[in-house]
Image: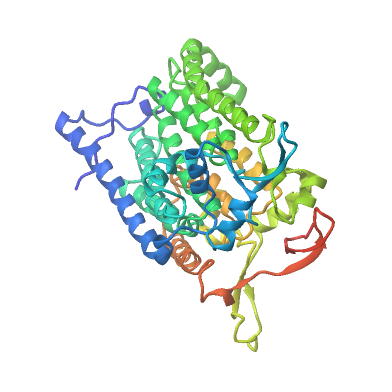
């Protein structure tokens, strides 16, 4: 099968791409049809693999189905569960009431009665997606949340492929469509997204939904020449912020793409950076770019307004998001250092960049694996060594820097956050920006030689093990979850998972 003919693109970067004969209408339709067919095949393959690995998790609801419970209580016309209701569910083993619920003491002004209320403090867009299905099922208990998450998990990789193809047809990605499909599948099965996709629980459900939104935002941004795509990109950012808050920091990509397609001519390639910036400014259609920025910003501003209204409805304060009210033992550090702090940076950088598998002595007890993995996860270069190729790209361009400007603030917020991602197989917060890294792998133009393929094989192998074994009965000996005693937020001694370094 021959390669599809590049689509016509009026942008300056596309003008630099090699010229080709105009494609007949039928050929162009076949090209679009083929891309969509490959994307559908990627979705189907990922869904089949995720479902097979998830196994019996698909048959019942998870014990941490906060989003499904949120949808259920919405149907009842409120935002919370009472302590009696949640405790009853906990005793029936329907939910874990001690894991990431925001606890509020509510005093009725008329009667003076105090009621303990439990709120889902996680951003609620995944619950919006689940709402019609929870309503049809009748309750969160009857809704199979892991099955729902697995059914969505293939969307992100499929959209990532379409984004890589869009770049190829614009002349900004030199990979073939087969290589683009390979990269999309490597993201799905050769990164920490794999183990995240098969869990179903609230933390991982948010990652799966956010990845689908992120890849949709990426694809919409690459169509910034169309005004509807600008509004769609902004809507996806707004939904992403209501799923994973760091999402909203990734607006640099759209800002660059909107400016690029608003240029009246090609920007000079010689001279200093300042000379080129002045030339770009002189050729920028200011009105066109402002229209694109406005269309992008309107849904984001709306999403912020909705979030503030939700916070006010739940906690009586538009700027209280709920995570400072969680019923978890490490709230003492949040009270001391806040949700985001330099204090957490060294620990989180350790989790993201230096944690290795633990090799135990040969005479270790039978219940201890020869190789174990910390509950704080593995370094990114261990789970996905392909990322090492990002350090030496063969080609760099404006898009390269725009993508890094998109990744940097998201990654920094994650690194400053009070939680490292624990408990995890690999550094799961990398899901917030990993699709951008795979785009950088594509446009970096390094050949996919023997070393790259060996790294890809390792990534597929280790992430398959993580997806199969993480929090799965029978694999406990391969995970090391050390604890220590500290003063909890209520002043009583309590056990807390060890972090590196401990607080």
Quadrant containing the C terminus is bottom right
Q: Position of residue 471 (x, y in %)?
A: 54, 67
Is residue 184 something that shows in the picture?
A: yes
Q: Is residue 439 left or right of residue 487?
A: left
Q: Nearer the viewer, residue 219 or 320?
A: 320
Question: From this viewpoint, which residue is outermost toward the top?
Answer: 287
Q: Nearer the viewer, residue 498 or 83?
A: 83
Question: From this viewpoint, which residue is outermost toward the bottom?
Answer: 363
Q: Give the number of marks.
A: 0
Q: Which residue shows up at 80% across the image and 57% down it?
A: 488
Above or below, 322 relative to 60: above
Above or below, 116 relative to 54: above
Q: Nearer the viewer, residue 102 or 42?
A: 102
Q: Is residue 346 left or right of residue 287?
A: right
Q: Position of residue 143 (x, y in %)?
A: 42, 52
Q: Which residue shows up at 73% across the image and 40% down it?
A: 113
Q: Position of residue 226 (x, y in %)?
A: 37, 22
Q: Position of residue 209 (x, y in %)?
A: 47, 44
Above or below, 21 relative to 52: above
Q: Which residue shows up at 54% across the image and 49% down it?
A: 66
Q: How is the image coloured?
A: rainbow
Is residue 392 something that shows in the picture?
A: no
């Amino acid at each position: 099968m021959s390669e599809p003919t590049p689509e016509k693109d009026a942008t300056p970067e596309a003008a630099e791409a090699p010229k080709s004969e105009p494609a007949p209408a039928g050929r162009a339709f076949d090209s679009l049809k083929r891309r969509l067919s490959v994307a559908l095949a990627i979705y189907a393959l990922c869904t089949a693999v995720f479902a097979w690995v998830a196994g019996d998790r698909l048959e019942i609801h998870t014990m941490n189905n906060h989003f499904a419970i949120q949808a259920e209580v919405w149907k009842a016309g409120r935002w919370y569960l009472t302590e009696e209701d949640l405790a009853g569910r906990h005793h029936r083993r329907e939910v874990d009431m001690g894991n990431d619920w925001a606890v509020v003491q509510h005093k009725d002004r008329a009667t003076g009665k105090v009621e303990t209320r439990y709120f889902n403090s996680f951003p609620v867009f995944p619950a919006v997606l689940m709402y019609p299905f929870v309503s049809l099922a009748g309750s969160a208990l009857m809704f199979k949340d892991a099955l729902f998450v697995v059914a969505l998990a293939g969307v992100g990789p499929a959209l990532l492929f379409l984004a890589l193809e869009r770049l190829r047809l614009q002349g900004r990605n030199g990979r073939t469509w087969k290589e683009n499909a390979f990269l999309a599948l490597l993201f799905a099965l050769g990164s920490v997204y794999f183990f995240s996709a098969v869990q179903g629980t609230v933390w991982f459900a948010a990652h799966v939904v956010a990845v689908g939104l992120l890849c949709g935002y990426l694809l919409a941004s690459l169509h910034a020449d169309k005004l509807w795509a600008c509004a769609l990109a902004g809507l996806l950012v707004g939904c992403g912020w209501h799923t994973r808050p760091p999402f909203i920091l990734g607006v640099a990509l759209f800002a660059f793409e909107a400016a690029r397609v608003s240029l009246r001519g090609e920007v000079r390639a010689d001279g200093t950076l300042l000379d080129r910036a002045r030339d770009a400014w002189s050729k920028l259609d200011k009105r066109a770019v402002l229209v694109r920025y406005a269309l992008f910003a309107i849904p984001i501003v709306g999403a912020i307004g909705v979030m503030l209204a939700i916070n006010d409805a739940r906690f009586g304060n538009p700027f209280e998001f709920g995570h400072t009210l969680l019923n978890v033992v490490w709230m003492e550090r949040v009270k001391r250092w806040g949700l985001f702090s330099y204090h957490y940076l060294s620990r989180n950088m350790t989790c993201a960049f230096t944690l290795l598998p633990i090799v135990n002595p040969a005479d270790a007890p039978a219940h201890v694996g020869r190789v174990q993995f910390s509950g704080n996860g593995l370094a990114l270069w261990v789970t996905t060594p392909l990322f090492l190729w990002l350090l030496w790209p063969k080609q760099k361009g404006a898009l390269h820097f725009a993508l890094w400007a998109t990744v940097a603030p998201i990654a920094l917020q994650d690194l400053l956050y009070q939680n490292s991602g624990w408990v995890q197989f690999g550094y799961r917060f990398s899901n917030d920006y990993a699709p951008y890294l795979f785009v950088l792998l594509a446009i970096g133009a390094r050949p996919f030689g023997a070393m790259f393929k060996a790294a890809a094989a390792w990534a597929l192998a280790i992430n398959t093990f993580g997806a199969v074994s993480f929090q799965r009965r029978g694999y406990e000996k391969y995970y090391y979850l050390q604890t220590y005693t500290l003063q909890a937020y209520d002043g009583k001694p309590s056990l807390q998972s060890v972090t590196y370094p401990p607080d």
